[in-house]
Amino acid sequence: MAKEGCSQEISVIKDDQGILFLGDPREIQRFFEEHSLASREFRTKALKMGGVALQKASDASMQSGRWVKLTKESAELVKKYGKAGGLQPGVAQAANGRIVKWLKFETPSQLFSPAMATGVAGMMTQMALEQAIQEITDYLATIDDKVNDLLQDQKDRVLADLMGVVFELDEATSIRDCTGTLSDAAWSKVAPCAKTTGTALAYALTKLQGICDKLARAHSPEDVDGVLERATDDARMWLFVIARAIQTRDRFSVIELERAFAEKPEVLEEHRLAIVEARRDRLAKVRTKVDAMRATLNETADRVRGEKLLHPFVVDRVLGKLDALMAATREFSEQLGIEMEEKTIERAPGWDVVARKFVEDRAADAAAAGEQMAAGAQDLGGKALVGAQDLGGAVAEGAGALGDAVGKGAQDAAKALESIDLGKVAEALPFKLPFGR
């Protein structure tokens, strides 16, 4: 419905993954350019599920439009101009206040019949998957030759199976694009892809955990450096494998949605919700494992950083490698739409700073020890003085008691000797004493 003095009305539909703008493509494109938002154009011929619904719409302008990924910026746009499903129109204005166009926020059920609304919901999920596929494709395009060589050198059967699935999906996609549908024979060839991608994803996550375990067991800077010598490239390689597995599964989900729509359109909504929930669960598992890896990188850096004084060059080299790995996880999470806290590896201070602090700390420790010794000496001196006084008293008392005992003993001995005839004793001896009586 057109408004006087402004452009044609644009219908807006929002779900948990993106925002669909229906109306005049030129007006919609101009609107996005004004707000610097990236969008994906669609045509009903290219989208089976939503295309059927949109082609049946009475308004020709409803048969085309653009889709925007739900981001912080696009969510702010919705918040500014209206509420999804709130039945309230939003007015987009130019800088001078002139009304540019009307945005009407609606739900699929308000625009189409229940069956058609289901098709539009499926189309929006399909577009979200295709957007994710493109973002991961862009990320994989950044792979360097070294990591590519590592991938090619891998003899793991799991990775070989994953690459085989990629070829099968390429072929199935080509058949679908040419014929407009996927035959039973073609579907039977790609149906096992779900299990293969799941196995590859679990395998790559296990490999990342193994790298973390090795870092946790390495204590000295030299040991950590030895682990990172190989693990730096390996970790990046397994991140690429994880991204490839998720991308391949997304491609399979797009075909799976179209297959479900062709076979049993009445259960498309349930199938769509299951696919969305399964993908959310996969990303949650990846997030948990990658977040744990980032925590291990931080813990390793903290452990190594304290060895800068004795291992200055090794510590700097290790921290640089850990930071490179942290940056790789950050790029990985951003490209896969996984929200993670911003983290970087703190570098160690310069060796002169560490050495100066070491000397200052030792001097401070020595000063503190001197004060403790002085205080201890004073305490010891006081105790020694008191002890000497106690000892002197004890000795004096003991000497008196000893003298009394000796005097008493001498008196008793003298009395005993008075009864003895020393002359007879002398005569009885076998030798003569040198002195007389």
Image (tube, helix red, strand yellow):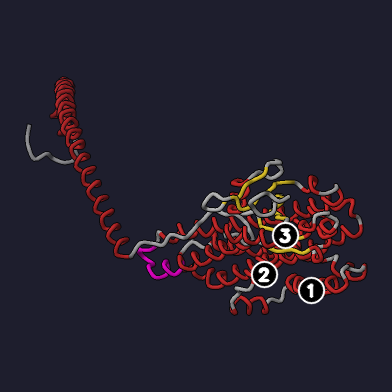
Identify the secondary structure beneath mark 2: helix
**CB atoms of marks 3 and 1 within 8 Å:** no
Circle 1 residues within 10 Å: few <14, some 14–19, many ≥20: few
Q: Is residue 258 magenta?
A: no
Disc 1 marks a residue whose amino acid type is: Asp
Disc 3 marks a residue whose amino acid type is: Gly
- Distance, label 3 to label 1, CA atoms, is 27 Å
Q: Residue furthest left?
A: 436
Looking at the image, is mark 3 or mark 1 nearer the viewer? Answer: 3
Disc 2 marks a residue whose amino acid type is: Thr
Q: Position of residue 380 (x, y in %)?
A: 20, 37
Q: Is residue 314 magenta?
A: yes
**CB atoms of marks 2 and 1 within 8 Å:** no
Q: Which of 313 and 200 is in front in this view?
A: 200
In the rendered structure, the answer to whether residue 38 lies left or right of residue 48 reads left
- Distance, label 3 to label 2, CA atoms, is 24 Å
Residue 172, by quadrant, is bottom right
Q: Name the residue under label 1.
A: 170
Give the magenta-colored segment's residue range: 308-318
Identify the secondary structure beneath mark 1: helix
Residue at 60% over, 73% down: 142
In the rendered structure, the answer to whether residue 71 lies left or right of residue 122 reads left
Secondary structure that dominates the magenta span: helix
Upstream in sequence: badge 3 or badge 1 = 3
Q: Which of 213 and 295 is in front in this view?
A: 295
Q: Mark 2 points at which residue?
A: 137
Q: Is residue 119 visible?
A: yes
Q: Which of 71 and 235 is in front in this view?
A: 71
Q: Where is residue 291 in the image (x, y as percent from the top left)?
A: 59, 55
